[in-house]
Amino acid sequence: MQFRMLGPMEVVDAGGVVGLGGTKQRATLGLLLLQANKVVATSRLMNALWGVDDAPATARKILQNAIYGLRGALDRRHDEREPGAATLLTQPPGYMMRVDPEQVDLHVFHKEAARGREQLARGTAESAAATLRDALALWRGPVLADLVEAGIQWPELAAVESTRLDVMEDFFDAQLACGRHHAVLAELETMVQAEPLRERSCGQLMLALYRCGRQVDALNAYSRVRSVLVESLGLEPGRGLQQLQQAILVQDPALSLPEPGARGVLVGQADPVQPPPPQQPHPAPWAGEIAPGTPTSREATAPGPASAPSVDGQRVLHQRGTDGPEPGRRTGPERRRVSVLSVRTRLAPSLADGISQDLDALLEGTGRLVREQVERFGGTVTAAIGSVSLALFGLDGPSEDAARQAVLAALAIRGVFDVAAEPDSAAVQLSVQASVTTGEVLLRRRGPDEAPTVVGSVLDESQVMLAKVPDGEVRVCDAVRRASEHAVLYRLSSPSPAGWQPLGVREEGADDEPHGPGGGSEAYELDILRGLVKHAQRRGVPHLVTVLGERGTGKSRVLREFERWVTVRGTKVRAIGVRVPPPADDPCKLAAPTHILSAYCGIKAGDDVPVARALLAREVRSLYHSERTSAGLVSLLTHLIDVVGADIDDVFGELRLTEVLDAWVQVLQEAARREPLVLCIDDLHLADDVVVDAVEKLVETVGSGPLFVVVGARTELLRRRPGWAGGKSHATTVTLDMPERVTNEQLVELLLSAARGEDTQSYT
């Protein structure tokens, strides 16, 4: 039996392709094969299949079913199996796929790649090229391509893809060493176009072009990669690539392929350089080895005026004067800890329709607005390419407060661009994403009037996080959160790998809206909600507020901003927010009450059923002195916890649904008597009638207690329930009108004004 992972997942035996079932089964097998012959914990499998915060309550059961199905598929001819055949084992704390590594194409690829690199290090380029070619031929497409297409994103997959690119560069090294620069030229051009930041393959392309007699194209390739590095990251190409460019400019003889059998020597020296030991497979950061026997080690840095760059395994001496350093030579690098803010702004295509102004000027305007906010909080924009800006905090002063300043700048930028972006609108014209990371960089100052050059892996980490940030949001890494949580309130985003979400500036003890950047634009409606919740809390009475608004009126935004305000205030108020999903996404129709109950009891998405039941029982029993009462309520509410992802009729049977929801109402009412409770339920018009009844009953029958319920709905709710909250005490309805939107012309004027350096305060 052979397991093929380098492409779509396949299992093949003598009888043909083995059926593996659905995506969950295939993904389970894929992850186990990535960790072949190692135990993978059940929690790791569930996180990989659903994400840290998105696993349903039945996740463990679904995983067990997937394991059962895989065993059935792999053991379909159990009597014919031989000793040592692949076996899926249960081993605490999870499962293990015991398999001969030779049966897995990924392992074969790694083994052949290592053998090819050893041959390359020994100088046997011909055999290395053949071995590496065979290793790459195992690939039938992206690793686990069918799972990736279904939305699977695992760090292990990115690592395997990166290894494939490394092996391709090893193969190009071997081909160049064999003099096959014409043969690899097309592949190199394709790879450099797809991976413009890989300097090694860019250097290989430059060398191949030069050896093909295309010196100008080789220099153009260098210019392209330098532009990408400088404009996107503020970095110059590495030393090896710069030296290769200089060697091409002077048409250095060392770039030419040596005669067959010739020993590589240092240019200007008579004695040959001994080849390196086999454990050094990469002689230079940008190019491959040359003919067998040519030195493959990185150049040894020698002091003195004669700087010797490494060119295809040889050192080229550039004669320089000895009177001092070169003009404009940079000073030594300085290691510094900084916080990195990456911002992406996007203009909708509709923004440019019918507008004659230059789109480049609009992009310049967005960049200037970003720069203004960054500098306002003490940061420096070090690079900008297209819609992406990179800013650093802590470059010129103490870095202790850099993380906080970077987060405040990110929130301010989001607030500025909120002038034109409405999440509930079908036609968002302008959106912004921002990420903040922190770490050490190497800082090189080129001159008093020039921007510094910065190098560090934290810059890449910032770009990776930025790609995961939803439109209109800000995310920060855990280190930034720890460094700034004294001043900024956070919550873990969902899914959590996307980072932490800053909610606003922390103002301990403040009784009004926290000060700070960011925030919504529906100030009047938010003021109404703030006043009502203060009134309910002060007098200990319940209140139901209905926020009515159609798509584009900002209904959802009002609820989100209000929930955030309640959380940021730092008072002892329990706030829970939920959005009712469309009926097509909620077969059980109870997602909203289930989420609210789970949040109150501290039940997380990844908790299995026994844990969820235990947490439910603990919270309910803490509310009631009577064991009989609490036991009865727990018995009913257990059905609500277990119903996630299932059909109501399949779970409840003869049990009346209203009885379960009555228990839900009773528990939340008792909880509100113990501590102020705020519930924000958006899109209630999508909820089933039994859920709408329960929400209404929640406030009507509570009697007393600071229970504050805010529901967002479209006017469809009133068509279904004409008497909704009408004429009832402790009930308020807020109707949102379609806002006066910033027109395309106004937005364009704002951005062009920013591009001209004019005052934009009146717009923001």
Image (cartoon, rainbow, N blue to C red):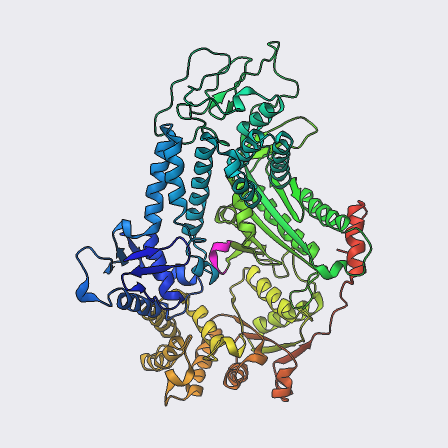
In the image, 230 versus 674, the foreground residue is 230
Q: Is residue 374 left or right of residue 483?
A: right
Quadrant in the picture for residue 51: bottom left
- Report if residue 294 is visible in the image: yes
Q: Is residue 584 above or below residue 340?
A: below
Residue at left 80%, top 50%?
753
Above or below for 529 versus 152: below
Magenta segment boundaries in residue numbering: 494-499
Q: Is residue 497 magenta?
A: yes
> 605 or 728, which is in the foreground?
605
The quadrant the N terminus occupies is bottom left
The location of residue 383, given as percent across then percent down, is 64, 40
Which quadrant of the figure contains the C terminus?
Answer: bottom right
Residue 18 or residue 745, whichever sits in front: 18
Number of dots carrying numbers: 0
Residue 157 position within the rendered picture, expressed as x and y whole percent measured from the top left = 42, 51
Picture residue at 63% right of the left edge, 89% below the top: 723
- x and y percent of residue 230 in the render? 63, 37
Residue at 48 percent of width and 77 percent of height: 586
Q: Is residue 568 magenta?
A: no
Residue 45 in sight in this render: no
